[in-house]
Image (cartoon, helix red, strand yellow):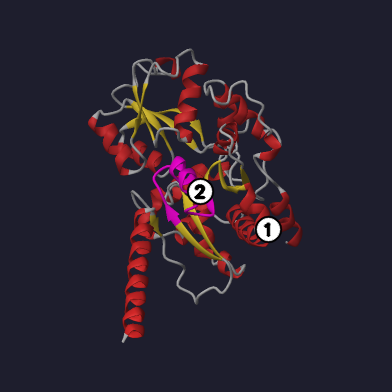
Amino acid sequence: MRRHLAAAAAAALLLSLAACANDAASTSGASVPKDGGPAVAGPKVKIMVGGLDKVIYLPAMLTQRLGYFRAEGVDVELMTEPAGVNATTALLAGDVQGAVGFYDHTIDLQAKGKSVESVVQFAQAPGEVELVSAKAAGSVTSASGFKGRKLGITGLGSSTDFLTKYLAVKHGVGAGDFSPVAVGAGQTFIAALQQGSIDGGMTTDPTVANVLDKGLGKVLYDMRTPEGSRAALGGLYPSSSLYMATDWVNGHKDTTQKLANAFVRTLAWMSSHTPAEIAAKMPADYAQGGQELYAKSIGTSLPMFTKDGVMPADGPKTVLDVLSSFNPEVKGRQIDLGRTYTTEFVEKAAAAG
């Protein structure tokens, strides 16, 4: 009888633990179903994305939709949070093995004593646009007009926060002379603009396309192309990437290589297909404003992406210069840029064809 009771208690405990695990998973970010094929027998990897429906992070979902993770024999679960800084938090907490967000977080984290590196560099330009509301457009014609304004960002400590502060400082406005407002992206950003909660802000496609289509704002700085990045920031600004803890990468090189192979294959596919063909592969609910406008937004942002996942040679220095201009934790620190990214895996992916 005691054995039966013990077995029953153990079973109840296991059910309780499973329920707790499921509850924890449901609160750590919305997970995305796999592509519907048979289960993958390979390693399981969780990747947190700072907004799966954002065009700047499009390679994450596209890789899954194309079946390239499965082809590499790796079981990838994509999860989403509204901002890249949230993805970084999940990575540092050990909730996920990889994050898709901006490369600049690797520099910021090194200044804080954390070792994280970009493994695949998706983009060579930010893909961000600084918008000004239609109401404020007459008085805010450059970042010099930021003083006293409420400016939308995805989240405090996010890359949109970093870049907005840089533009302000570059144009003579102190980083504390305007109010950053965390409004996310998509409908929350648009609503804040409509309601006058913000005078402008930094966001990406497809939000940009929808704001312009509705006549709610105008473009102040367009950083969706290499040319736009150089004009606003002084050089190429590598942004969206797959970054991972250095210790994890060194301990799981085979799995990291599989991920790199899949992503590099996707970037090559993107470079040889039209925006409409890319849009057709994505989930239907990503097409805010309709499929035609969504395809247009992809086309506008497409120049930001690399074709091979390789870090642009002069990019890391530009990012360091930008962060050093306003971030006291980075300014004056000895940052080893060589430890903030690796090309080992993308080079092997290219060599393998």
The amino acid type found where label 1 is placed reads: Lys
- Image coordinates for residue 303, horizontal then vertical, percent: 57, 42
Disc sitting over residue 91 in the figure: 2
Q: Is residue 322 left or right of residue 164?
A: right
- Image coordinates for residue 220, horizontal then vertical, percent: 43, 26
Q: Is residue 141 visible?
A: yes
| Disc on the earlier residue, 2 or 1 | 2
Q: Which residue is mark 1?
A: 253
Is 218 colored magenta in this rendering? no
Q: Is residue 216 left or right of residue 307?
A: left
Is 95 colored magenta in this rendering? yes
Q: Nearer the viewer, residue 68 or 231?
A: 68
Q: Residue furthest right?
A: 351
Work out how far the residue at label 2 is from the one at label 1, CA to CA, in angstroms. Answer: 17 Å
- Image coordinates for residue 2, horizontal then vertical, percent: 33, 83
The amino acid type found where label 2 is placed reads: Leu
